[in-house]
Image (tube, rainbow, N blue to C red):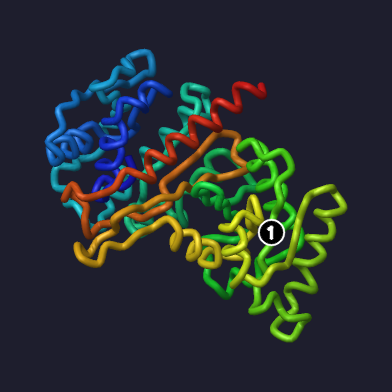
Amino acid sequence: MGDPASIGPEIAVKALSQKMIYERCKPLIVGNASVIEKALAMLNFKSRINCIQVMSQARFEYGVLDVFDLQGGDLSSLEYGKVSAIAGDAAFEAIRKVIDLAVNNHIDATVTGPINKESINIAGHHFAGHTEIYAHYTNTEKYAMLLVDDDLRVIHVSTHVSLRQACDLVKKERIIDVILLLNAACQRFGIKNPVIGVAGLNPHAGDGGLFGDEEELEIIPAIKEAKSLGFNIEGPVPPDTLFSKAKGGMYDGCVAMYHDQGHIPFKLQGFDWDAKNNQMKNVRGVNITLGLPIIRCSVDHGTAFEIAGKGLASPDAMLQAIKYAIQLSTNNVQSS
């Protein structure tokens, strides 16, 4: 459900109001039934809630929202759009429960709504985000964030760290790891021999060492080793041209060296701002955590506290995330 004070419950309810989702999978919401009831009332939706505690109680019937009800905490005082420990704890427990269900093979894939990192942390759960929570509770050491929107696919060498720390994390071994993860993901999407473009860290990809030596010391050796393993790699490509080339079809996937290097061009493509109404008109893009033993897809937008509880949130990214989760879980079955 994501953060209960966010647009998370709203976009979950909106997504599951579409019959086509039930024609392709058996969906349920993990979270607090009272939060989902509040979202239904706010939207004036007529769906009924079926509270469950074990999977056998789920009905998977269009018009009935199966909610794995966590029942923990008093959320009656919860306000939309507000940072709070109550909301953070509820969001965290929903994440932990959905991971548990997936690890124990009760469900085939997980899709997460947006969370507020401040709320999570003031509730006493000290994680930088979803990715780190999933890695911790699945005992995963090598993982990475992949952003997907149509043919644009961007993986990150580092994510939720300071920019100064991100520069220090540009290491040959890590770059090779994310190349391997990206190549495998592209193949799961049906691309047999992916062409991968690797960004430089510095302006002009270092320009032969004039603007930094990370390319010469770490990035180029990683690319050379990946090529020796048979991967179709190009780079380091100057970061200011890599993503426009990828958008034009030159690359099947891109390796970004840090969070904003990959997120800014990605969201420039997928997010449309409506200046007249002072809100986002469309928000597309899916965040997939690679390297986990379970499937985790997510919306690639935030909690949008400014419109939470107003019924204005677009479910586009949630629908995309569900579709990718279905695709990845189907591929798992076919390859097992």
Name the residue at 67% across, 38% down: 187
- Name the side, left or right, on which 228 lies relative to 151: right
| SS at mark 1 in the image | strand
Above or below: residue 113 compared with residue 19: below
Q: Is residue 145 visible?
A: no
- Name the side, left or right, on which 195 lies relative to 55: right
Measuring from the top left, give residue 48's x and y in whole percent.
19, 23
Name the residue at 49% across, 49% down: 149
Name the residue at 19% across, 40% down: 74
Identify residue type, mark 1: Gly
Q: Quadrant of residue 191?
A: top right
Q: Is residue 233 visible?
A: yes
- Name the side, left or right, on which 271 lies relative to 256: left
What is the crowding at mark 1: few (fewer than 14 residues within 10 Å), some, or many (at least 20)? many
Q: Quadrant of residue 328?
A: top right
Residue pointed to by mark 1: 197
